[in-house]
Image (cartoon, helix red, strand yellow):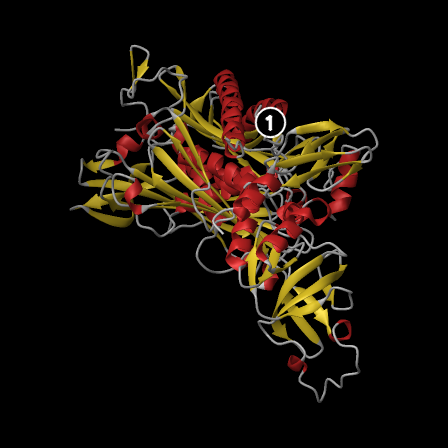
Amino acid sequence: MNEKERPIVLPGEFLCEREGKRIGDNVYEENGKVFSKVIGIPKITESEISVIALSGKYMPKVGDRVIGTIIGVEVAGWFVDINSPYVAFLPLGEAVEEFVDTSRVDISKYYDVNEVIFCRILKVAKNKIIQVTMHDLHAKKLVGGVLVKITPSKVPRVIGKGGSMINLIKNKTNCELLVGQNGVIWVKGKDKSKAIEAILLIEKESHIIGLTEKVEKMLSEEK
Amino acid sequence: MKRGEVKLITDGKRIDGRKPEEMRNVEIKLDVISRSDGSAEVAFGKTRVLASVYGPRALFPKYLQEHETGILRCRYSMAPFSVDERKSPAPDRRSIELSKVIRLALEPAIFLEDFPKTVVDVYLEVIEADGSTRVTGINASSLALALAGIPMRDLVCACSVGKINDTLILDLNGREDNYSEVDMAFAMMPGKGKITLLQMDGLVTKEELKKLIEIAKSTCEKIYEMQKNALREKYRVSE
Amino acid sequence: MDSYVLELLEKGKRIDGRRLDEFRKIEIRENVVEKAEGSASVKIGETHVIAGVKAEIAQPFPDSPDEGILIVNAEFTPLASPEFEPGPPGEDEIELARVVDRGIRESKCIELEKLCIQPGEKVWCIFVDISVLNHQGNLLDASALASLVALRNTRIPKLEDGKIIRGEYQGKLPVIFKPINVSIAKIRENLLVDPNFEEEKVTEAKISVAVRDDDKICAIQKQGSKEILFEEIDKIIDLAVEKSKEIRKLVK
């Protein structure tokens, strides 16, 4: 096997015996044996068996910080597209601190259609009713810049260990970057095309080892 | 002419020169449609089918949504130029039935319960038809679903088998499809040993039926390797 | 009700008290529609379908210029069940009609070559229309049986100067076999013959097998959204062959 490759598993492929471990993302159990549900990279730790998918849609999880676009203004909140099969709802109380008399105030003055927000997933009900909140240290409205979409499962690769990858791109391009767990990345800055190129390279070759070096090389070229 | 009246086997060779249990050349291409969430093209000889997957995505109108599970939709369609006489592009009764059986062949493999209220759409387009289009399409769909990251129990592999005179044959071409005495469409999850499609018409004894299923099973196991190799190849980055 | 069906099955019982391999009571009535060339009403338990046959003159298909034509069509009338809606045929109706068609066609029970009037020009076209009047499960077996019985009592109209004289007949439609359709449902580890409506709702997979008089199998169709195992197929085929003999005795 090529050393630069990570081992890929396919749907239905046997991973290991369960042996009391937790069933994590993208795996299933059958008679004590654990199999992959997707094409991905297996992650078997002492306590959990999971697979990092190489493709697929974003499935909201409580606590995830995501980048969303307002797609509807209601009486007491907003519908937010979070790049998922499920539309999220931002209740008024989770967005605005002050008291708002909804019978008199048009709440689109806070957030309007097509505006972009960095928010946190507050609640995921069993039937996939999703709520997001702006009551979060990092939450904010994102003004200007462009949105780049990547496969959500590749977000950790864009961030890198301890933020190494994202900091590399920030430093080399002097761009502002925000990465949503939902695979939406906000890029703002003069040199944004370089940053976007780097992000797309990571998206394409996320499964190879030595990716950081490759990205660094790419960013250093043809200044 | 009708079933059984066309000479399809001479001196142990079929009209396209194949041995009875020989498959046609299988060609697999992945990611053939860039906007798709997952796509594949599979060819069995001249039969060529494209499959494209969209989803899971929000399902509208809302009353179609299932609260506990996602739903799968399939559409099998033949391009008007894919057959000898132009086929009207509107779905005919055969296409409607095939869309249903293909859906049911794929559904056991998919964890639809992982994405309630949504839909996964699988669109199949037969570009050229020379027999065995539904099973070719199922193989393409299996690959497209896997590429789209849809959670699956296993890949789904499919093939056709049949009977000419007293000879059992594998992977029917167009003429054999029309004139052989028996044809059977078969799909399974090879890793699980579970059958997801079984359709047969023609006259067979119980023993012949058993033998046909055996041939189909061992062929699906071979196709399983082909599907897996194609998927692994995609992620093999040279450098 | 769903969970009750399953609970009973754990004890090997069915909600209507039948054995797993037992059909509901089958009632066949022939010639129920005078206007039709052939007709039959079949009840399997509460499930009720009528099949009517009409014969028309048509041009033969180019690849079989001296053979009659068989066309099977099914309609789930909205009065039969709250799930049925008016409108063009849906995939379930189309599938049912096509599976019934294949059972009849592949068994070669109709001597289509005897239905030629003028080679390449005129042949008899036999339309079998199935109307589902009450849906209490296993529509397929009821429809196939009604179609077979209707075909077996079908008379071919008289011709005068190439025109059909309605109400007068020249003879019977040649039907030489009795293909019987048997549907078997898989619910967990159980195989149930002739599933009723409640059982169909929890059916994981269903296999319909058409069997001819000589025990040859002429059509198979798997339905349902779950898989089936190899050893189950063997059992299903054996069961279908056995049950087909029982039902065939009811057909004149």
Q: Is residue A210 above or below residue C76?
A: above
Horizontal and vertical percent position of residue A174 = 60, 59
Please, which residue is most extreme toward the front here? A223
Q: Nearer the viewer, residue C233 or C24?
A: C233
Please, which residue is most extreme toward the top here? B11
* Image mark count: 1
Please, which residue is most extreme toward the left here? C161
Horizontal and vertical percent position of residue C3 = 76, 45
Residue located at (18% from left, 35% from top) = C119
Q: Nearer the viewer, residue C60 or A138?
A: A138
Please, which residue is most extreme toward the right here? A20
Horizontal and vertical percent position of residue A23 = 77, 38
Q: Is residue C8 visible?
A: yes
Q: Nearer the viewer, residue A152 or A172?
A: A172
Residue located at (48% from left, 18% from top) = B205
Q: Quadrant of residue A2?
A: top right
Q: Nearer the viewer, residue A89 or C188?
A: A89
Q: What residue does disc 1 label? A: A3
Q: Is residue C150 left or right of residue B179?
A: right
Q: Amino acid at mark 1?
A: Glu
Q: Residues within 10 Å of mark 1 (few under 14, many from 20)?
A: few
Which quadrant holds the N terminus of chain B?
Answer: top left
